[in-house]
Amino acid sequence: QVQLVQSGGGLVQAGDSLSLSCVAIGLTVSSYAMGWFRQATGKEREFVASISRERGNTRYADSVNGRFTISRDNAKNTVDLKMNSLKSEDTAVYYCAATRGYSNLWSQFAYEFWGLGTQVTVSS
């Protein structure tokens, strides 16, 4: 049974940094493309970042490019999201996701497995 167990998150001030972690159980992160998505209250779930399987190519939403970094630790079987220079508009529930696919990693519909989500709140 696959589980994506998320940790991190919380309440921070604008301009602060925060890291999210996603531990995979029942799958090997190096063999899956991994993504982070977020959903703010009253809004659609949106793409944040992805890292492809095997080669580890990364992609970011324009809104977070240059501030957020997605990384994979094969030894720990985790995928992390390092968030710098946080803004109030980054406030959302963040979700980790995994797929065996190679394409459309910006789309939530490409992903097979999801974490339960973790709240990130940025106060201004």
Image (spheres, rainbow, N blue to C red):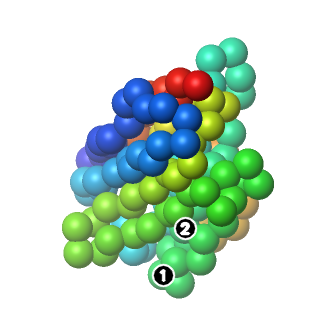
Residue 40, given in percent of the width and then of the height, sits at 62, 25
User: Compared to 87, does 36 lie above or below?
Assistant: below
The residue indicated by pointer 2 is 51
User: How far from the left and from the top, in percent, is residue 35?
Assistant: 54, 55
Q: Mark 2: which amino acid?
A: Ile
Measured as percent of width and height from the top left, residue 70 is found at 50, 63
Whether 75 is drawn above or below 5: the answer is below
Which of the pair 96/84 is nearer the observer? 84
Number of residues whose C-alpha sits closer than 10 Å to that of mark 1, classed few (under 14), some (14–19) or many (20 or more): few
Callout 1 amino acid:
Glu
Q: Is residue 105 visible?
A: no
According to the picture, the residue beneath numbered tag 1 turns out to be 54
- Corner quadrant of residue 89: top right
For label 2, the SS is strand
Q: Which type of secondary structure does the marked residue at label 1 adopt? A: loop
Residue 108: quadrant of the picture: top right
Asked whether residue 21 appears in the rendered view, the answer is yes
| Number of marks in picture | 2
Compared with residue 79, is residue 119 higher up or lower down, i.e. above or below? above
Mark nearer the viewer, 2 or 1: 2
Single out the residue that lies furthest toward the top.
Answer: 42
- Which residue lies at the image location 55% right of the left edge and 42% below the top edge? 15
Report crowding for label 2: few under 14, some 14 to 19, many 20 or more residues within 10 A (C-alpha): many
Q: Position of residue 78 (x, y in %)?
A: 32, 61
The residue nearer to you, when weighing 45 against 83, is: 83
Question: Looking at the image, is 36 positioned above or below residue 53?
Answer: above
| CA separation in Å, label 2 and label 1 | 9 Å
